[in-house]
Amino acid sequence: MKNQNISRRQFIGAGAIAATGILFLSKRSFAASFLRIASKPNSVINGVQIGVITYSFRSMPGTAEDLLKYCIDCNINAIELMGGAAEDYAGAPKRAADQSGTDFAPKMADWRASVAMDKFKELRKMYNDAGVSIYAWKPNALGAKNTDAEIDYAFNAAKALGCTHVTVELPEEAQTKRLGDFGAKHKMMLGYHAHTQATPTLWDIALNQSKYNGINLDIGHYASGTSSSPLPFIEKYHDRITSMHIKDRKFHDGPNAPWGAGDTPIKEVLQLMKKKKYKFPATIELEYTIPAGSDAVAEVKKCRAYAADALK
């Protein structure tokens, strides 16, 4: 057997070379891990989840891949996803140029009733791998004219996307009863959205119909329609708010405005969320006119920066 004895100098030298190699690999591995972490967005600010509704990017190309890129560019890690992009990704039929809505509706209903959830799960994974979660989905399949199969589809797709709730414009009370029953069946919340028709009691019938009926509050519309602060409403109904749209509007049914230029108490609302540790997301909704030379991504970044400053 060959003599394995080596001198102290040789041992130290060999150890130093090995240690250097290990250190180099460790640093390189650490750097790679750090870059992977640093590249993912994060919009949880002092305990408040800031999100965005992808409607905010309606002026730009709107594929699911496009929308994900915009979210990452804006450093936002959670979203309310509008229905069209997800359905397009899943292979929904396209309306022909000469096809009316009446003609197209049965075709969509048939597709929704039979489509597998694989593509919705794939979409969720693509977003999650990039560091973005989808907390709500707003499908165009929860209306009074939609079939029961379509409504089941909407909840199943939302589950596949990883959502905690679906959102929908507040319908008549017969439909909120119907949807509340579906919410109970699927054990998933609905967030009902309102515009300037909002009042402090607007949602009461729906809330009493089902524990799965909730509120997708828009503080800009509420402030504009009531000419008052939404803070008392939020404190009263916080446990039924699924998510909340953030925008600025003037009182007395006034126009949308860049954040800080309207009458909506955005800072006070966000501070209330921080103080009370409310866990529902605060969703940026870009509705004011985009200035010349800017675009939706740049303006959503401004809104996010405003929210971050408000939450200091």
Image: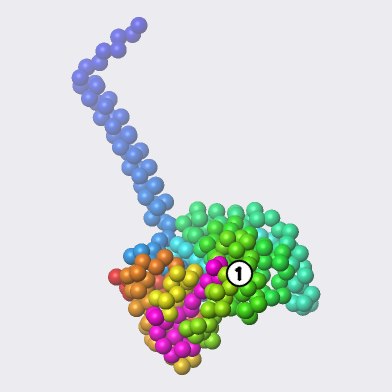
Residue 62: tell me if it is visible. no
Residue at mark 1: 180
Residue 145 vs 117, above or below: the answer is below
- Rendering quarter of residue 119: bottom right
Residue ID at (58%, 58%): 159
- Most foreground residue, 140 or 97: 140
- Amino acid residing under circle 1: Gly
Residue ID at (72%, 64%): 149
Query: Magenta stretch?
Result: 211-232
Q: Position of residue 111 (x, y in %)?
A: 74, 63
Q: Is residue 231 magenta?
A: yes
Look at the image and tell me in which quarter the C terminus lies.
bottom left
Residue 106: tell me if it is visible. yes
Q: Is residue 49 magenta?
A: no
Give the left or right position of residue 281, taking residue 184 as reference.
left
Q: Position of residue 108 (x, y in %)?
A: 73, 68
Residue ID at (43%, 72%): 238
Mark 1 neighbour density, 10 Å: few (under 14) some (14–19) many (20 or more)? many
Give the left or right position of residue 183, taking residue 111 as reference.
left
Colour scheme employed for the rendering of this structure? rainbow
- Secondary structure of residue under mark 1: helix
Residue located farthest toward the front when viewing the structure as drawn: 208
Look at the image and tell me in which quarter the N terminus lies.
top left
Residue located farthest toward the bottom when viewing the structure as drawn: 252
Residue ID at (77%, 68%): 107
Residue located farthest toward the top when viewing the structure as drawn: 1
Give the left or right position of residue 55, taking residue 146 as reference.
left
- Most foreground residue, 132 or 238: 238
- Most foreground residue, 268 or 92: 268
Q: Position of residue 46 (x, y in %)?
A: 33, 65
Q: Position of residue 117 (x, y in %)?
A: 65, 55
Residue 131 vs 203, above or below: the answer is above
